[in-house]
């Protein structure tokens, strides 16, 4: 899968969630934090969005998804 940065409209489309729900899930540890693209722009790596969507579709619990989010964010730091 090609790794791209998705802006909020694309993330909303792919996840079926509203902007406020995405940010609520970030606060709850159920979604990865966005990456900064500039002074007023953020986005999410497409592979992270896909992984979280796949986990939700597979029926993973919130605790399992939190663990996935921690792993995805750690992997992001290691990919520098």
Image (spheres, rainbow, N blue to C red):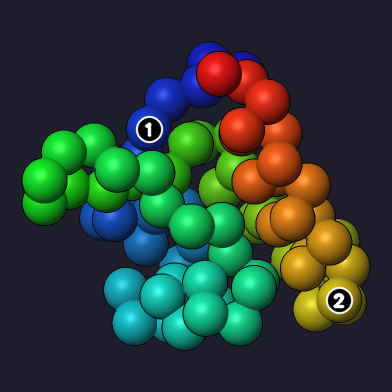
Q: Identify the image quadrant of the C terminus.
A: top right
| The image quarter in which residue 60 lies | bottom right
Q: Position of residue 67 (x, y in %)?
A: 84, 61
Tell me the quarter of the picture where residue 66 sits: bottom right
Q: Does residue 14 show up?
A: yes
User: At x 58% / y 64%, what residue is drawn?
Assistant: 31
Q: Position of residue 69 (x, y in %)?
A: 71, 57
Q: Which residue is label 1 attached to? A: 5
**Element at badge 1?**
strand
- Above or below, 26 against 48 in this view is below
Instruction: Report x, y in % for residue 72.
Output: 70, 44
Pointer 2 residue: 63
**Residue ID at (26%, 55%):** 9
Secondary structure under tag 2 reads helix
Camera-side residue of 1 and 43: 43
Viewer-nearest residue: 11 or 23: 23
Residue 57 visible here = no
* Badge 1 density bin: few <14, some 14–19, many ≥20, Cα 10 Å: some
């Amino acid at each position: 899968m090609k790794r791209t940065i998705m802006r909020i409209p694309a993330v909303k489309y792919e996840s079926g969630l509203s902007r406020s729900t995405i940010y609520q899930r970030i606060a709850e540890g159920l979604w990865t934090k966005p990456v900064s693209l500039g002074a007023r722009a953020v986005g999410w790596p497409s592979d992270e969005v896909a992984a979280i969507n796949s986990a939700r579709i597979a029926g993973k619990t919130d605790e399992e998804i939190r663990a996935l989010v921690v792993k995805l964010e750690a992997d992001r730091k290691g990919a520098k």
